Image (spheres, rainbow, N blue to C red):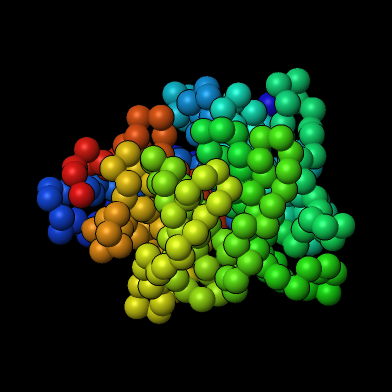
Amino acid sequence: MLHTRLLPALFAASVLVSQVQGQIVPDGAAVEQVATGYLFTEGPATGPDGAIYFTDIPNQHILRFDADTGEATTFREDSGRANGLMFDPEGRLIACEGAADGGKRRLSRTEPDGSLTGLADQWQARRLNSPNDLDIDKHGGVYFTDPRYGKRADMQMDIEAVFYLAPDGTLTRVIHNLQRPNGIILSPDEKILYVADNAAKEIIAYDVVDPGKPVNPRQFSDMGPDLGGGCDGMTVDAHGRLYATGDEGVYIFNPDGSQAGLVPVPERPSNCTFANDGQTLYITARTSLYRIMLNTAVDP
């Protein structure tokens, strides 16, 4: 572990009380800033050790926040401009390493000894655009989005797609007709795959009939100017509610797509995830990492 960056503070944010049964966001709850001083945070993931791992993309760092000590330390330098993170069933960190200014344009795995293994960097002999976000199913298969933001001159594919990396290493393009897929998450039972099309400003839901086979696309929610202005990262709670980042904060949706609440955040959030308790929502937002305790026990 390397240097520590820590600046705990409370952000006294007002929160929108859920209009469903009970309160998802408790009355008087406050969003707490637990680490700050970064350039652009992304990719929060809960590790097998209970710590929250997240990325500072421009600085090419993967950070580790320890809730017990309140310290954020550098887990990995030279991250390849890592964006989305998630731990696989064996407890290894899988990272979407993006494009531009040192980006590796690949999916990587950090081994227990700290070494790196490249998992995928091309499809049909063409380099990936810029792996952005991911989710891992119970079989160890990885769904990941591959959009391109910023410079596009070195793109080798004219489609910004969603891929599935099977446990045997086979890479398949599974969704090819979105404008700019970004956030991606499976429902708790892994029967639904949600993909945020950031350019189209909507969230699309797919049925997963078999691992790596999403079908029956339909709009789950509009995320236009009146509702988020486009979605970045997402997560789900144990009841299947979807938490999607947007302009004003984290938007909460019931499984039927109706809005259940909003958690305002002082900076535009990029992504979010739950801690192991299933109640503490960690949010990456520009310069900082935030958290808030939610009442996720409430039924939709």
Q: Is 70 drawn above or below residue 34 in the view shown?
A: above
Residue farthest to the front, as pictured: 209
- Which residue is drawn at the image coordinates 79% and 28% (left, top)? 115
**Furthest residue toward bottom:** 225
Question: How many marks can you see?
Answer: 0
Q: Position of residue 258 (x, y in %)?
A: 26, 63
Q: Residue at x 41, y 68 (%)?
A: 218
Direction from residue 147 to residue 13 in the image, left or right = left
Rendering coords of residue 131 (x, y %)? 69, 55
**Quarter containing the N terminus:** top right
Residue 278 lies, in percent from the top left, at 34, 34
Question: In this view of the protein, can residue 281 be seen by the observer?
Answer: no
Q: Residue 108, relative to residue 103: is it above or below?
A: above
Q: Nearer the viewer, residue 219 or 155?
A: 219
In the shown orientation, is residue 25 left or right of residue 102?
left
Seen from the viewer's position, the closer of residues 266 and 64 is: 64
Q: Report the residue at 32% width, 39% height from top.
A: 238
In the rendered image, the vertical position of residue 249 relative to residue 294, given as above or below: below
Q: What residue appears at the point 75 percent right and 62 percent down from the top-left corner?
A: 129
Choose top left, top right, bottom left or bottom right for residue 162. Answer: bottom right
Comparing 178 with 57, the one in front is 178
The answer to whether residue 200 is seen in the rendering is yes
Q: Position of residue 284 (x, y in %)?
A: 50, 50
Q: Is residue 107 left or right of residue 216?
A: right
